[in-house]
Image (cartoon, rainbow, N blue to C red):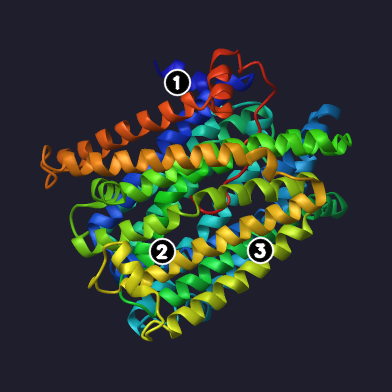
Amino acid sequence: MVKKILKLFYQEFGGLHRAALVLAASSIMSGLLGLLRDRLLAGTFGAGRELDIYYAAFKIPDFLYIISLSIASVTVLIPFFLEKIDVGQKQGKEFLNNIFTVFLLAMLFLIVAAFFLAPYLAGMVAPGFSAEAKKQLIVLTRILLLSPFLLGLSNLLSTVVQSFRRFFVYALSPILYNIGIIIGILAFFPFFGMNGIAIGVVIGALMHALIQMPSIARLGFLPSARAKINFLEVWQIIKLSLPRALGLGLNQIIFIFITAVASFLGAGSIAVFNLSFNLQSLPLSVIGVSYSVAAFPTLARLFVNNQKRQFLDYTIIATRQIIFWSVPVSILLIVLRAQIVRVLFGYGQFGWRDTRLTAAALALFAFSITSQALIILFVRAFYAAGKTTKPIVINILFFIFIAAGIFLSFNAVDSSLSPMPFFESILRVENVEDAEMLLLPLLFSIGMIFNSIFLCWIFQKDFGKIWPSVKKTFFQVILSSVLMGAVAYFSSNVLDKIFDIKTFVGIFFQGFVSALFGLAVWYAVLRSAGNRELIEITGALKKKFWKEPQVVVPEPEELP
């Protein structure tokens, strides 16, 4: 048994089907562990100041991790590495040593600088915290500074692992990361408090990297620092990686700004924002990231070959599929938000006020899941076409838009023109303490919706019309999803009288059965309408879709 498991560590997974199965299983397991992690955090602390401090402590390490992607981006490194090893193993190892040396020097400098600047950086991330809370934030931030180095190193190592198709080892990395955090919550927190959870994060990041090292050592590509560096080669990598790193860096600045604003609000505002954002990120990752990552290599190849019409058509196909999947998921999240939050977080210190605010925030995020997924697609399409500046400029504009919206909204929150009473009524959070924090997910979602519309408009100006080819899908999916939502809503009201919704089992089955009834209606409506995407997906399941080229999995865009 042990030999069979060890064999998997060194086994090559050729072809898309086997690799995809391994990575899909890893993604599901990592997602489930991520939910367990958040459940333990919510149950242990509730949506209060301690959990605010925990989430705020990630902001600077997250930003450093994004900087590391300008040097250690898998999607950029793999083509270069494969080209080098085609020449010889020595050339491949020299290439890795060059990248590793620059990465090591750059990250050590940034981490040491951030360590000493932590008191000033903490004041920027959470200016509304008390002196005692800031003190704890500084300590946690300093501990977590090891994570971006270890996860950036893991990205560099995965260049080798993926190039040689050792996907089982790669698939274990995110699982071990979440296990490390869970160990920190269960084993270290009782002895070391919040510092113990941060130590668990670092242990998880360390395991994320270490699990890949035996395979890399066996292949003969374990990187080491060197005195002589080929800076021209490294600069080529940075030039290609920098636009994406800048785009992701702007996203992190938005989240730092939101965290800073939330620090002035009631205790738990940062926690509610992050817990609900993490929940909506699960379907976003499955839908938006999956389709965008899958489409990117083909889009790049079509554009390079000057096949502009095919480039546009492929983008349209991906757009239709994203709409097809994301709209019904959004509707279900909105309709069944209370059941979802109660099932996942409703125990321990996570009280009724926390549940209502998190459910309301989840609904607000859900409104923009389709927009967020389309932004990921259009940004990658621009990158595939070599137009990296436009997405960055648009990101800057909408960061300003979101920041201005937050500033104006909070200044008007006590005036007669404030939209808060209306939204509190719609989201059923009237008289809930600190409900004004819901302006943050609301304005974030509004910003994402306008961002996606603007990106689409610019994309159409450059490459051709998209809307005429997707509007039929859009209206079919909207109609079927609204009917699905209505059925799920009325079903939950009926099942309220059948199941005991004061228990975990009762609330779970209320939401689960309601979702099944709604999805059955959604499927029936789309099938009767002859929906193109439903036919395409049904047909794809019958084909041998695994006879495809090698998978290349991008690095995560933030600390997991």
Question: Mark 3 Cα within 10 Å, few/some/many (few <14, many 20+)?
Answer: many
Task: From the viewer's perspective, tell me whether residue 512 is left or right of residue 545.
Answer: left
Q: Amino acid at mark 1?
A: Ile
Q: Comparing marks 2 and 1, which lies closer to the viewer?
A: 2
Q: CA distance from mark 2 to mark 3?
A: 23 Å
The image shows residue 370 at horizontal and vertical percentages of 53, 48
Residue 535: assigned label: none
Image point 33% across, 81% down: which residue? 132
Mark 3 vs 1, N-terminal side: 1
Task: From the viewer's perspective, tell me whether residue 449 is left or right of residue 438.
Answer: right
Image point 58% across, 35% down: which residue? 321
**Is residue 118 visible to the viewer in this orientation of the structure?**
no
Mark 2 vs 1, N-terminal side: 1
What residue would you read off at disc 3? 395
Task: From the viewer's perspective, tell me whether residue 494 is left or right of residue 302.
Answer: left
Q: Is residue 244 above or below residue 499?
A: below
What residue would you read off at disc 2? 55
Question: Mark 1 Cα within 10 Å, few/some/many (few <14, many 20+)?
Answer: few
Label 2 sits on a secondary structure element that is helix
